[in-house]
Amino acid sequence: MMDEAKRVPKTLQGKIIITGILNVLTGMHIGGSSEFAPIGAVDSPFIRDPFTHAPIIPGSSIKGKMRTLLAKISCNDYILNAIDKDNAVVSRLFGASGKNYALPARLQFFDLFVTEATKKNFTAIETDTYIGEVKFENTISRTSGVANPRQIERVPAGAEFVFKLVYNVESLEEAEEDLKTLATGFKLLENDYLGGHGSRGYGRVQLQDIQLKPIGDFALDLTKYEAMFKD
């Protein structure tokens, strides 16, 4: 259980807006609903914006993946600890709760939408679906040897998404450790995968053009912290 010090609410001193571009390096699949799919439809479609029908990356996917990666490198056991056993930095960045406490997250994630340049580029070329490709795969039963073909829709390599993340500055003393941990989370994500089927090469991504913008009057040299995300 978290100690009392971790439960003390801190005064909001400002915010840091972290923006950039998430570039898809290999086909990425973050599943959407295939319920009520018509005959001939893709078996496993990716999630789309219901208004524009362009692919999106839910903020929850980024948050969950990054938290899991940071929890794994700070865990001392082979089996990942329970979420309420995350270390202090991970808990205050992503939030935590238990029987008698709740710790609000200092990070606010946003859904990621494709850039206008991506829409323009992929409209000009022929793709299997709108800003999508269909990959045919087989799973083979080890006992019978029977193949089970399936179709997986992927966001193609080269697609770019607008990335935005907000960090609440609640403690200047903890800000450097928080931002350093977050920069580590970015690097872990770039060397892992986003979405499903990552062990087969799906979902490799890269974060580019990272910029930090302050909101509020607080004494932090954001140039130094920005360099952490670009190294």
Image: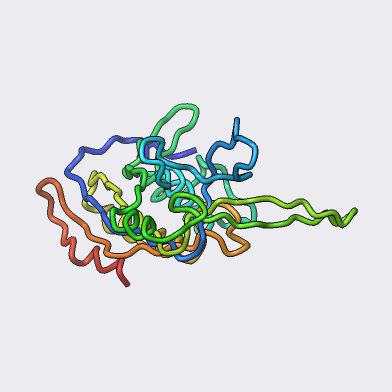
Q: How is the image coloured?
A: rainbow
Q: Residue at the location (35% across, 44% down)? A: 109
Where, by quadrant of the figure, is residue 101 drawn?
top left
Measured as percent of width and height from the top left, residue 168 is found at 25, 44
Could you say which is closer to the camera, residue 159 or residue 96? 159
Q: Give above or below for 184 relative to 71.
A: below
The mark tally for this picture is 0
Left or right of residue 83, residue 22 in this image = left
Left or right of residue 173, residue 81 in this image = right
Q: Give above or below for 97 relative to 212.
A: above
Left or right of residue 106, residue 134 in this image = right
Q: Residue at the location (52% across, 42% down)? A: 83
Left or right of residue 147, residue 229 in this image = left
Could you say which is closer to the camera, residue 228 or residue 172? 228
Could you say which is closer to the camera, residue 3 or residue 55? 55
Measured as percent of width and height from the top left, residue 3 is found at 42, 39
Measured as percent of width and height from the top left, residue 10 is found at 25, 38
